[in-house]
Amino acid sequence: MDKRELGYNLGLDVVRGRDTSSLMFVLEAQSENSRLDDVTVLEHSDAFPVWDRNWTGKVGRIVRDPDDGQLYRKVNADFNTAYPQSQPSVDKSQWKLIGDPGEEWPEWSPPIGAHDTYMKGDKVTFKGKRYESAVDYNAYSPEEYPPNWKEAD
């Protein structure tokens, strides 16, 4: 597989100037069975493509948002391909922020599956307020189902 074909499979529009090790790192980070944790991915955020309105990647692909510079993973498939893909920092229903696990009050993001739902005591920031999950396996936002969350002081 040449670099152009590899870049296409990664959902990258431009692969010129990228070395093979950088492309392989991105491929591993975006694979379904990746052994890379979010801390490692964040340490190499410059290896990931910057999202633009022509982006056509699949679920699981990682991009940098052009406005906030943060990394996001695509979590939901787009059903209407006639419209441009949604921007990661704007449409949280389609993208999951790859955040620093050392951050005490990370921004709430929708779980991809049961493996990353919020557990009792998990802390989040949602619309400028801090919350702790009151239940295990919490998949709802504080707005969607308030009884699952306790607002922090």
Image (cartoon, grey):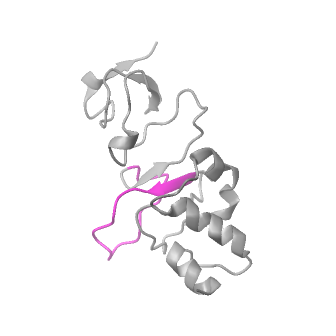
Side (left or right) of 20 relative to 148: right
Span shown in magenta: 71-92
Task: Tell me which secondary structure the magenta stretch mostly adopts.
Answer: loop
Q: Quadrant of residue 51?
A: bottom right
* Depicted 52 relative to depicted 124: above or below: below
Residue found at the very far top of the displayed protein: 153
**Looking at the image, which is closer to me, 25 or 59?**
25
Q: In this view, does 59 lie above or below 151?
A: below
Residue 137: give x, y in percent of width and height. 31, 32
Image quadrant of residue 95? bottom left
At 59% from the left and 55% from the top, the residue drawn is 67
**The stretch drawn in magenta includes residue 77:** yes
Residue at x 59% of width, y 31% of height:
103
Residue 11 at x, y = what percent?
51, 74
For residue 100, above or below residue 81: above
Residue at x 52%, y 57% (from the top left corner): 34
Residue 12 x %, y %:
56, 74
Residue 50 in view here: no
Q: Where is residue 117 drawn, in percent x and y?
A: 36, 37
Which residue is nearer to you in this view: 20 or 17? Answer: 20
The answer to whether 146 appears left or right of 13 in the picture is left
In the picture, measured across the screen, residue 102 lies left or right of residue 134, that is right
Q: How many labels were placed on the picture? A: 0
Whether residue 140 is visible, yes or no, is yes
Name the residue at 57% across, 57% down: 65
Quarter the N terminus occupies: bottom right
Residue 29 on the magenta span: no
